[in-house]
Image: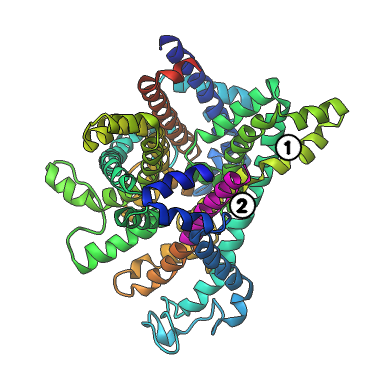
């Protein structure tokens, strides 16, 4: 297990270096550089000012020098300064991450636990009434983009029923219940789609497992059906689900962008979008790297969990 | 097929068993027919849409702004008095074309890379796969956003970004299918005959990896529609006044409560297209799996 972990950590480091290079290259393609962004507003195109600032920011150096300086600074926890917010990026990212996690973690918990229940119910009687009902619901779930379901939620629950607020701005110092009230709709939208994906996976892997000889043996030796399903079958059926949970974290990061946009919520996703709109290259570079790192770490954790649950993986 | 038939049949009693055997083994699944029907309808709309709409998509009617659905404007009008029915129908072509082209780009490049990487193997395979790892360590939507941010927000770049997001994923699927064929007899026979690499890849291996590629293409197509509408919703795809569905929802959000049809009409179009593509993909997978077992 230790050897496996060491190998995976080594691969993660390589991948992260690759990611940083890729982000750096793509961001370099952006038309205009940081200096154009800072000066454009109030300086006519006088060559002198531009060159001076470029020199001050170190943008006159060769690209590979700039890249390695950036990488070196990241390793020291320095993510640079945002141009549009005129502040260090690291604290902004941490704050926005906190906001996004308040959506993502409850959504993940809700969708994972509900999907296991729904997936098992559907798999016990494939092609039964409940299975068909759950299939129709999950098919709809995966077919509705987050911004569409978000808009519908606002229309139904905020405008017509007036149960929840239509925008999700948080104010500090409010209690837990206020948060739950404000965040209920975005969390519901985010959970719904993850729920649909996870239920489909759980259902199909549960159906596969229920066909295996060992499940039949357990049933034939007289164990109660409930015990066989929840103790024998579910543990194996959960393996693909664990992998999909990791994919869902990545998917959720994308979904978070849309949900945050719909509910005007100040999380990581809206920060990325903001940096694109403002052409704030240091902020865009840093936030993209931050998100990709989080995704890779989540994948690593899922793989570890998989290896713990299924010893065969470690030796392949 | 025979094994599953007896397993299911004996559970349902003898009558059900005979009924199952009598059924033609290559029956087309219902989901494939419904999905195909829905997608076909959207394709027809994309082809003839602009000729059948009552108004041009960008014609203003200032006297009837935000009008509810009526005989004149079937799905109501937006804030400039543009006919929403006409806009949604016009938008079909845009969405279908963007999603289709993006998928086509991703599947073509992914196919080439996957076949090559899987067949050639060695360090080339290792390098290519590490590169796909890196590209896939971005959540799809965020990678697409990054690419569009770099190239500029418009339809063409949105399509390119979808192609870039899909290429590594398709390459992975094709590669693993290719690996399975690397040491089968007809491939080794071709090698012994002294055939060129490209002959073996395209004439021996490619015809045998079509089923997983078709299924993967259907899955990709549904993600492509999602990506197209999501990007344009975020302002990173088609630009106004294009009648793009995602863009319509984003731009008319403010009137969601007072004139819900401005959002509901494009939303319905998006959801029904994606449901259609998903059904098509599910049905296709089921059908190909059934065909495979029937062949064996």
Q: Dot 2: what SS?
A: helix
Q: Nearer the viewer, mark 2 or mark 1?
A: 1
Out of A207 and B54, give the one closest to the viewer. A207
Out of A65 and B116, give the one closest to the viewer. B116
Q: Residue lying at the far top in this picture: please name it.
A: A3
Q: Chain of mark 1?
A: B
Q: Locate residue A161 relative to residue B127 in the image: left or right.
A: left
Residue tagged by mark 2? B102
Residue tagged by mark 1? B205
Magenta stretch: give its range: B274-296
Residue B112, disc = none
The type of colouring in the image is rainbow
Q: Residues within 10 Å of mark 2 (few under 14, many from 20)?
A: many
Give the percent coordinates (x, y) of residue A78: 42, 24
| A15 vs A137: above or below | above
Q: Residue at x 25, y 59 (%)?
A: A166
Q: Is residue B156 magenta?
A: no
Q: Earlier in the sequence, mark 2 or mark 1?
A: 2
Give the percent coordinates (x, y) of residue B92: 55, 68
- Tell me where residue A251 sits by quadrant: top left
Give the percent coordinates (x, y) of residue A134: 32, 54
Quadrant of the image for the C terminus of chain B? top right
| B47 vs B51: above or below | above
Q: Are marks 2 and 1 on the same chain?
A: yes
Q: Residue at x 53, y 47 (%)?
A: A40
Out of B1 and B81, give the one closest to the viewer. B1
Q: Residue at x 67, y 25 (%)?
A: B125
């Amino acid at each position: 297990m230790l050897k496996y972990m060491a190998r995976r950590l080594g691969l993660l480091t390589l991948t992260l270096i690759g990611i940083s290079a890729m982000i750096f290259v793509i961001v370099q393609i952006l038309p205009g550089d940081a200096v154009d962004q800072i000066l454009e507003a109030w300086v006519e195109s006088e060559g002198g000012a531009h060159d001076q600032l470029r020199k001050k920011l170190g943008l006159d150096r060769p690209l590979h020098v700039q890249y390695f300086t950036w990488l070196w600074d990241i390793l020291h926890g320095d993510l640079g300064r945002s141009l549009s917010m005129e502040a260090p990026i690291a604290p902004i990212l941490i704050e926005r991450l906190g906001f996004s996690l308040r959506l993502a973690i409850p959504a993940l918990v809700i969708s994972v636990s509900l999907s296991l229940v729904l997936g098992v119910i559907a798999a016990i009687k494939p092609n039964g009434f409940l299975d068909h009902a759950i299939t129709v619901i999950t098919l709809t779930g995966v077919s509705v983009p987050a911004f569409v379901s978000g808009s519908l939620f606002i229309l139904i629950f905020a405008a017509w029923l007036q149960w929840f607020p239509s925008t999700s701005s948080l104010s500090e110092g409010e209690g837990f219940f206020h948060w739950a009230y404000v965040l209920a709709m975005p969390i519901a939208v985010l959970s719904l789609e993850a729920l649909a994906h996870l239920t489909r996976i759980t259902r199909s892997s549960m159906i596969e497992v229920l066909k295996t000889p060992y499940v039949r043996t357990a049933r034939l030796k007289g164990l109660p059906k409930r015990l066989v399903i929840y103790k024998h079958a579910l543990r194996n059926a959960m393996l693909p689900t664990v992998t999909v949970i990791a994919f869902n974290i990545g998917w959720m990061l994308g979904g978070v962008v849309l949900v945050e946009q719909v509910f005007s919520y100040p999380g990581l996703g809206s920060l990325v979008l903001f940096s694109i709109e403002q052409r704030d290259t240091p902020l865009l570079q840093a936030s993209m790297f931050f998100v990709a790192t989080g995704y890779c770490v989540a994948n690593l954790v899922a793989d570890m969990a998989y290896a713990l649950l299924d010893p065969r993986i470690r030796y392949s | 097929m025979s094994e599953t038939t007896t397993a299911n049949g004996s559970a349902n009693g003898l009558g059900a068993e005979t009924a199952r055997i009598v059924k033609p083994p290559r029956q087309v699944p219902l989901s494939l027919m419904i999905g195909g029907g829905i997608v076909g309808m959207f394709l027809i709309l994309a082809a003839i849409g602009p000729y059948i709409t009552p108004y041009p998509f960008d014609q203003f009617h200032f006297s009837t702004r935000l009008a509810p659905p009526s005989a004149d404007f079937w799905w109501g009008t937006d804030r400039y008095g543009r006919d929403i029915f006409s806009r949604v129908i016009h938008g079909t072509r845009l969405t279908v074309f963007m999603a289709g082209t993006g998928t086509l780009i991703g599947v073509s490049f992914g196919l080439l890379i996957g076949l090559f990487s899987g067949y050639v193997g060695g360090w080339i395979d290792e390098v290519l796969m590490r590169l796909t790892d890196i590209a896939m360590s971005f959540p799809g939507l965020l990678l697409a956003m990054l690419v569009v941010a770099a190239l500029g927000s418009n339809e063409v770049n949105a399509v390119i970004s979808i192609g870039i997001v899909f290429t590594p994923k398709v390459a992975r699927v094709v590669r693993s299918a290719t690996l399975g064929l690397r040491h089968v007899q007809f491939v080794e026979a071709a090698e012994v005959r002294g055939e060129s690499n490209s002959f073996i890849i395209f004439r021996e291996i490619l015809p045998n990896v079509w089923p997983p590629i078709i299924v993967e293409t259907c899955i990709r197509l549904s993600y492509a529609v999602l990506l197209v509408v999501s990007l344009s919703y975020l302002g990173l795809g088609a630009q106004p006044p294009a009648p793009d569905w995602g863009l319509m929802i984003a731009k008319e959000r403010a009137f969601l409560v007072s004139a819900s049809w401005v959002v509901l009409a494009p939303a319905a179009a998006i959801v029904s297209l994606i449901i259609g593509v998903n059904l098509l993909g599910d049905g296709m997978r089921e059908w190909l799996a059934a065909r495979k077992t029937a062949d064996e």
